[in-house]
Image (tube, coloured by chain):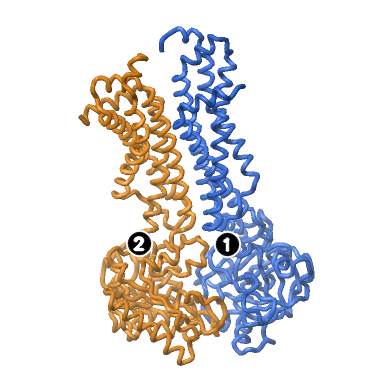
Chain colours: A blue, B orange
Amino acid sequence: MDILPILSTLRRHKITAWLLILEIALTCAIVCNAVFLISQRLERMRIPSGVAEHELVQIQLANIGNRPDAAARAETDLAALRQIPGVQQAALTNQLPLSSGGSWNSGVKLEPQQQLDTANVVQYMGQNLLPTLGTRLIAGREFRPDEFVDYADAVAALQSGNMKGLPQTLVITQALAERLWPGRSALGRPLYFGQGIPFRVIGVIANLARPNMLEKGAEYSTVWPIRLNLTQGASYLIRCAPQDREQILKAALAKLKQLDPRRVVLEKRTWDEARYEFFQSDRAMASILVGVCVALLIVTALGIVGLASFWVSQRRRMIGVRRALGATRSNILHYFQTENFLLATVGIGLGMVLSFGINLFLMTHYELPRLPAIYFPVGALLLWLIGQLAVLGPALRAAAVPPVVATRSV
Amino acid sequence: MFGYYLDLAVRSLKRNKMLTALMVIAIAVGIGASMTTLTVMHLLSGDPLPGKSAHLFYPQVDTNPTNEGSHAEPPDMMDYRSAVDLWSAQRADRQTLIVDSSIKVRVPGGKLPALMETMLSSTSDFFPMFNVPFQYGSAWTSEDDARHARVAVILADLNDKLFAGQDSVGRTLRLKESDVRVVGVLKPWRPLPQFYDVVGGRFSDGDTAGFYTKPEGVFMPFTSGLEINDGNFQQFNCWHPPERPGHLEGASCNWIGLWVDLDSAAKVADYRRFLAGYAEQQKALGRFTHADNTRLRNLMQWLDYNGVVPRDVRLQTWLAFAFLGICLFNTIGLLLAKFLRRSGEIGVRRALGASRAAVFAQCLVEAGVIGLLGGIGGWLLTLAGLSLVRRQPAVYADMAHLDASMFIVTFALAIASSLLAGLLPALRACRVAPGLQLKAL
């Protein structure tokens, strides 16, 4: 196929040709970046929680206020919950992975005198929390019962500066261990919180996601041997077989109401529901982006169809002459296909530069990573394909122009 | 002449229905997408108190005496002592303290189960300062503030739930374990954003939809609110953990906001000096270490500083306008095709004496008609788009409606963009040489 005649024709239709090129370039740039944004959202939604996802049920009760029997009441509640048939584990926890609302975060340091924090970590607390969550221990050990400290006692110890009253040990996630001591074992190493208060790592668990603020390190989690009661906004977490969840949620609520009918339930849900809710806006955004991409590609394809039809009808006479001089139908067909391919190629080239620019903008304003190189060839293929599909109809119509047209005047 | 051009335009559009439909659809889709997001932007980035917002200021002082954390900006809230000191100085025209907490609410003797509501503990100036509309009763007085009165103002929503929407002034509510008297019921009130509670936007990583929630259900005097809900207050941040969680008076925690009303530049300058003076004095007393770190932002600056418009919404707006841009490129191409295909006709018109300006105007009228048709389509698509927005999980979703001004903007944008798209094709069309075209005919 000789492209010189095509180029000379395009030179006479500069404006239309450039319009088409620019449209393809813009579409290419936006679709590449939108698809990248979608993939980022999907990746975020796939993050491992590290817990027994389909086996957890959460019940959060309103704070009953500072009363002396708060700890005893929590024990009674937990004992009652554990008696419900089918309940495997029960615990009180200050927060759940991947659930909206507040979260308990703190800076962590590797040296007591350090000015800036090394990382921002989340603090999970609660007795019997790890077995209930179902995390996987990969090094060291979990907490011994004698390591647990009451939350109120820990705060009092902190106030009075008595380090003995504070918990001494921590369990951390592998991701955090790798961040703090890359390539080395974390076991037995010291970590400092606040104004240089020391803790020792005794165990490493495979995964445990943060409740939120995932951008601070989705799995930078620490677990503390601290016993909670309802005054700290804690919620009950129950582990059971997946098929029993609904039934156990009902039974647990009934049991808690029976123990104190005046309590207000703030939250009752399975962990799956919590996770679904947590990613709701990501899901909505991803579907909007998908809609925009599809609409963009359709609009661009329609634009190509429109312009190609116009060119075909404009060049009917020329096509007729070429056919009369011996060009076959497939010659004509290929002519329009090649023309579209050339325009698409220039458009894609420009579009790549533009999508790189948009990506740079998003990187500074939306903390997005760099667009992976794979997007460029895939985006190019997609646009070439759409261009060829869109031009096929008009090109076939062009190929069907009979040679006799040449003998007529317009 | 316009009528004639209109007639020509309609004829020409009818001649090639396929091409016309393509252009109208392109404009309609572009307008639909951009107006949907623009309406949401308009809703979320608007001024919650037009005419008043320039006089409302949010003072900040750096209460944290330790070297922990960053001192580039003062904390978003204040500790009890700083907030109460600044409030009691009464150096502004009006001033109000703000603190939120959740509380159990029920009607004593009522059959309804207790509800958990958010309570705003504030001072009597709150209502006149923020133009809060009353349905029944009125605000409490500054005497009520001073004598820790057990009175409350409730929101229309809560009044509907608890008292079936009737005038409940004088009725009793049980908040946690205390009985309080209802003195006022607000009209349905939904400032967007819920500006007086906005804090911590810089830590939210663009996920700021929470700033658009409904106002609190219960409003109580600051003094009595702190008493009856003691133990249930949440800190914004602490530099030492509180001795008793939820009890923050005297604790090293920031948890109270202060708004002041200053209606002239002189008063603002005075207040700035007062704030700096206060910080210096506290530094001398050994309570502050970063005394020069004070701020006095007005309402819109404060909202801006907190980046209240969610990042996803801004991204969607960018995306929608890029989309409109592509639709316009499309329309330019198609209009060009359409006008140049009619070169013969234009040549005849020119030969018969039509001026270039006349041809140009006629082409633009045709583009404008396409814009109008696209505008109608775009308006319908915007309505559809907004109904999709309302089904989104965001807290502001229920407020997404097309108001009169955005309705006008829809058509203005549609016609403006189609005229813009028609500009280049019309210029090309009016440069058609009459002789050349006639020869070919």
Q: Is residue A376 left or right of residue B42?
A: right
Q: What amino acid type is highlighted by mark number 2?
A: Arg
Q: Chain of mark 1?
A: A
Q: Chain of mark 2?
A: B
**Outermost residue to the bottom:** B285
Q: What amino acid type is highlighted by mark number 1?
A: Ser
Q: Residues within 10 Å of mark 1 (few under 14, many from 20)?
A: many
Task: Write down the residue under mark 1.
Answer: A99
Same chain for marks 2 and 1?
A: no
Residue B337, placed above or below residue A245: above
Q: CA distance from mark 2 to mark 1?
A: 27 Å
Q: In x, y percent, where is residue B216?
A: 39, 68
Q: In x, y percent, where is residue B79?
A: 46, 82
Q: Please name the residue shown 64% across and 40% down the image.
A: A377
In depth, the one of B118 and B307 nearer the eye is: B307
Task: Write down the residue under mark 2.
Answer: B190
Residue B24, placed above or below residue B182: above
Secondary-structure class at tag 1:
loop
Secondary-structure class at tag 2:
loop
